[in-house]
Image (spheres, grey):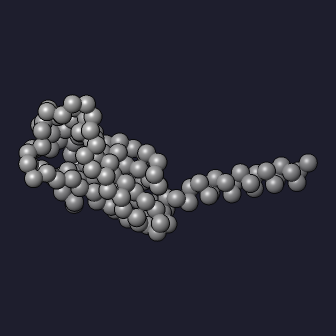
């Protein structure tokens, strides 16, 4: 009986370590520049920066940033603006979104996906 319990425990531990081997997002935030201050408010001519700190990640770890206009003047409903994927090991990844014209005022969001699964959403506003 103890052998079966030990075998079951070993299987659970192996499954848990396999799931966690894809790395994790230690932190993610919006910033004013690639090395800038944290913010959630931008001007109409600003570039949006999403900084993602990746930890315990093998070199094949994929991080994706999906940018959305959520509640924006002149845009009906929520609309995806862009998607960018980066493959990396432990690193500080910088995603950005710029516009040749003025950003419409309103609420925006970037979804951060880790290996294809939504990890977190960061909302920000253009004022």
Whether residue 36 is visible, yes or no, is no
**Which residue is most to the bottom?**
59
Q: Is residue 126 above or below residue 86?
A: above
Q: Is residue 59 above or below residue 118?
A: below
Nearer-the-camera pick, 31 or 101: 101
**Which residue is most to the right?**
1
Nearer-the-camera pick, 98 or 93: 98
Q: Is residue 91 left or right of residue 2?
A: left
Whether residue 50 is visible, yes or no, is yes
- Measured as percent of width and height from the top left, residue 34 is found at 22, 60
Q: Residue at x 18, y 57 (%)?
A: 33
- Measured as percent of width and height from the top left, residue 5 is found at 83, 49
Residue 13, image quadrant: bottom right
- Measured as percent of width and height from the top left, residue 49 is found at 23, 53
Q: Residue at x 21, y 53 (%)?
A: 97
- Measured as percent of width and height from the top left, residue 76 is found at 21, 30
Nearer-the-camera pick, 52 or 75: 75
Q: Is residue 102 left or right of residue 72?
A: left
Q: Is residue 61 left or right of residue 31?
A: right
Residue 51, image quadrant: bottom left
Q: Residue at x 16, y 53 (%)?
A: 98
Nearer-the-camera pick, 72 or 24: 72
Q: Across the whole image, how many numbered discs are drawn on residues?
A: 0
Q: Is residue 75 above or below residue 114?
A: above
Which quadrant, please, contains the C terminus? Answer: top left
Q: Is residue 33 left or right of residue 122?
A: left
């Amino acid at each position: 009986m103890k052998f079966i319990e030990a075998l079951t425990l070993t299987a659970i531990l192996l499954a848990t370590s396999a799931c966690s081997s894809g790395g994790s997002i230690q932190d993610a935030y919006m910033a004013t520049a690639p090395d800038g201050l944290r913010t959630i408010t931008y001007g109409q001519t600003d570039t949006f920066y999403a900084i993602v700190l990746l930890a315990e990640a093998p070199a094949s770890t994929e991080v994706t940033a999906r940018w959305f206009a959520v509640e924006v003047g002149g845009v009906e409903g929520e609309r995806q603006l862009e998607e960018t994927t980066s493959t990396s090991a432990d690193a500080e990844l910088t995603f950005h979104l710029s516009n040749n014209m003025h950003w419409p005022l309103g609420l925006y969001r970037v979804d951060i996906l880790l290996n294809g699964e939504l990890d977190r959403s960061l909302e920000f506003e253009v004022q």
